[in-house]
Amino acid sequence: MVKIVDRLLFVRRVPIFQELRDDFIVRLASVMDEVMVPANHLIFRHGEEGRSLFIVVTGQIQIHLGNKELAIVSQGEYFGEMSVFDAQPRSASATSLEPSQCLELTQEQLYEAIEETPEIAVNIIRVLSRRIREQNEQNS
């Protein structure tokens, strides 16, 4: 079981949540589910409908397209975040490389938190807008 203090630290590391006030972070951290996965477990497959993001508490997760490795995600890092916002098919697959523990935030949990505290959405929009601006500057 992940202690609430640790949950807060893990959620705070996700860039889209970094600028949220502490009370918003507490709200999100409190609704996240703990997911235990054995080694070599397919967490989700490329093309599947996705509606959640994961934060790695322990272990390592490989993000891949077929046999091509795209990234290795480990403690404190996150994956699957795009599907929380757009509910589009997964852009890659995720497989645990070793026994792993993750926190999962579903789209439904995020939307419920936003309903209760709309400022969460405003903060997330601000962060995403800044990321787009930074990308535009880099590409120009």
Image (spheres, rainbow, N blue to C red):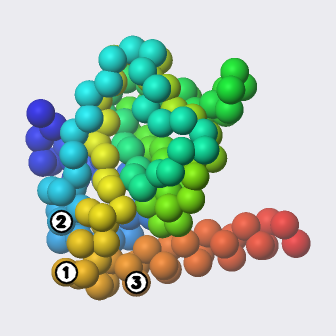
The residue labelled by disc 1 is: 116
Image quadrant in which you'd find residue 21:
bottom left
Q: Which residue is mark 3?
A: 122
The amino acid type of the residue labelled 2 equals Arg
Label 3's element? helix
Task: Tell me if 39 is positioned left or right of 80 in this view.
Answer: left
Judged left or right of residue 42, residue 5 is left
Amino acid marked by disc 1: Glu
Residue 97, placed above or below residue 16: above
Mark 3: few/some/many CA within 10 Å (<14, 14-19, 20+)? few
* Type of the residue with mark 3: Val
Mark closer to the chain start, 1 or 2 = 2
Give coordinates of residue 122: x percent, y percent: 40, 84
Q: Are marks 2 and 3 in contact (CB under 8 Å)?
A: no
From the image, which quarter does the N terminus lie in?
top left
Q: Residue at x 84, y 66 (%)?
A: 139
Please tell me which residue is depicted at 57% across the width and 47% down the height of the picture.
90
Report the quarter where the C terminus lies: bottom right
Residue 25's x, y, as percent? 24, 64
- Cα separation between marks 1 and 3: 13 Å
State the residue in front, 53 or 124.
53
| Crowding at mark 2 (Cα within 10 Å: few <14, some 14-19, many 20+) | some
Q: CA distance from mark 2 to mark 3?
A: 15 Å
Marks 1 & 2, CB-CB < 8 Å contact: yes
Element type at marker 2?
Answer: helix
> Which numbered disc covers residue 27?
2
Q: Which circle, 1 or 2, is nearer the viewer?
A: 1
